[in-house]
Image (tube, grey):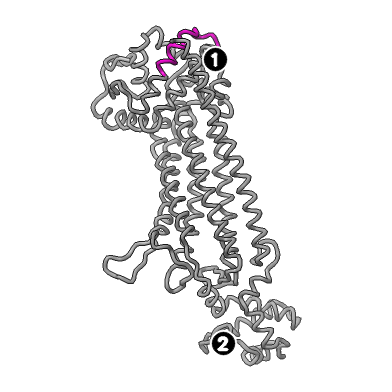
Amino acid sequence: MDEQHRGKIKKKPAAEVVKYLIGPAIAQDLERSYQTILDINKAHVIMLAEQGIIKQDVAASILECTQRIAAMQEHPEFEINPNVEDLYFNLERYLLEQTGPEIGGQQHTARSRNDLFACEQRMDIRGFYLKLCASFNELRQSLLDLADKNRDAVMSGYTHMQPSEPITFGHYLSGILNALERDFRRIENAWESLNICPLGGGSMGSTTFMINREKTAELLGFDEPMQNSIDCTASRDYCMDILSAFAIASNTLSRFAYDLYIWSTPEYGYVEVDDSCAVCSSIMPQKKNPMTLEHVKGKAAHLEAFFVSVFSVLKNIPFTHCRDSSTEAMRFVWTGMQEFEADIALINVTVKTLTLKRERMRENAVGNFCTVTELANYMVRHDGISFRSAHGVVAMLVGYMQEKQKFANEITTDDLNPIYQTLLGRTTTLTNELIQEALDPSKNAQAKKTIGGSNTDEVKRQLDRLALHLERDNAKLTLRKTQVQEAKENLERLTNELAALAK
């Protein structure tokens, strides 16, 4: 392609177009799409030869040159001229110089840059997406390991940031893991809209050549070809699938990070982030700031913004190929994926190096009245009163103890009976031993054996189930990676076999 004659266009691109559009696009494509474009070229040429659309010796010459270009490894020995418009045309120009326009010029038969770029974007994103799926599951495994070690680490649960009922840290992490499992399901489901092949859709109107789209889809590792040529080049909804799933997952991670953030303060003192995940103040020597947790919380906002950016560009544009969808909508997709990669890595290293202050957690649970719901339950069981009546007794009891500046574990029948007499006209049958049993946070947590409860064996059941699901998810992920890798190996084998005929 001549920079002075780009089809009907008779002038080279304006300097501003080169600076702000073409130049950055070429730089990005050289970094992450060089081999992808060449792989698409290989698959297309192999298919054209098999269909008899181009002759085998023509395909052999094209593929032999393509392999030489591929061997240059993102550092082409030939000039990359931005005035030619994009990386693809620069690669094609070199091919034409090496093979002649009547040979190399046949590569683009039955194809447009529109379906080529749509295919390239899906393949580039697919590689990063699979990597992020694996990283996300590594985080899930880290949390499983931490939860299993702390199934008996009793602590206060909280609602409205107030002490509620005793749980264990393992029980808490099981809750986070269940949410992350749903997050992964949303991430994983994006594969269906991502891994379909647009190659062969042409500019948007298909082609009159009898191409084999199933063949190119298979050679490039896709599940199947997209079923409508307009949809091939118009659609970028898979980007919204991926980024919305990442944004929702980052929201879960942000809420988890917020809990750890609060619990790492001296006032709570439940956890301590490792020195490697913290920074000190430049002026206050006592400070240990949990840096990673602050960034994890912040990055959730970025992920939301990247999704909104893609969504906003794609609305109110034609359902066909245009630069809005193919370029502007894609601008922050890769950035969003990089941000999610950092998000996962930061919370994972924090989890792996986290120190749990088990005694401090138990100490708070003993005294902060999170156990008194069970005291009310004991009244229902032993005294035969309604829970609502027991609730009223305990509410007045807690108020009385707090006025006297006493803790929950200091409650005795001497404190309880006057309130019982006032509200119910009787005294309790509970002994001091039974009261202390009800108020023991460990016994309290262990008594919750129903599905979803905090009992150690029940939490183990939850974690075993989560581990089984993680194993299933990893197995499916391995199959997808294998599918892409085997397609790549088959493409290289067929390319080399055909290219050898040119020698």
Residue 385 pos. (x, y %): 74, 81
- Label total for image: 2
User: Is 434 above or below relative to 173?
Assistant: below
Identify the image quadrant of residue 31.
Answer: top left
Residue receiving disc 1: 211
90 vs 112, left or right, is: left
Q: Amino acid at mark 1?
A: Ile
**Local secondary structure at mark 2:** helix
The N terminus lies in which quarter of the figure?
top left
Q: Are marks 2 and 1 in contact (CB under 8 Å)?
A: no
Q: Position of residue 258 (x, y in %)?
A: 46, 61
Q: Which mark is residue 427?
A: none
Q: Residue at x 40, y 11 (%)?
A: 105
* Label 2 crowd bin: few (<14), some (14–19), many (20+), radius 10 Å: some
Residue 465, given in percent of the width and then of the height, sits at 66, 54
Which of pointers 2 and 1 indicates the residue nearer the eye? 1
Q: Is residue 357 magenta?
A: no
478 displayed left or right of 303: right
**Magenta span of residues:** 50-66
The amino acid type found where label 2 is placed reads Tyr
Residue 150 appears in the figure: yes
Mark 2, residue position:
400
Q: Is residue 115 visible?
A: no
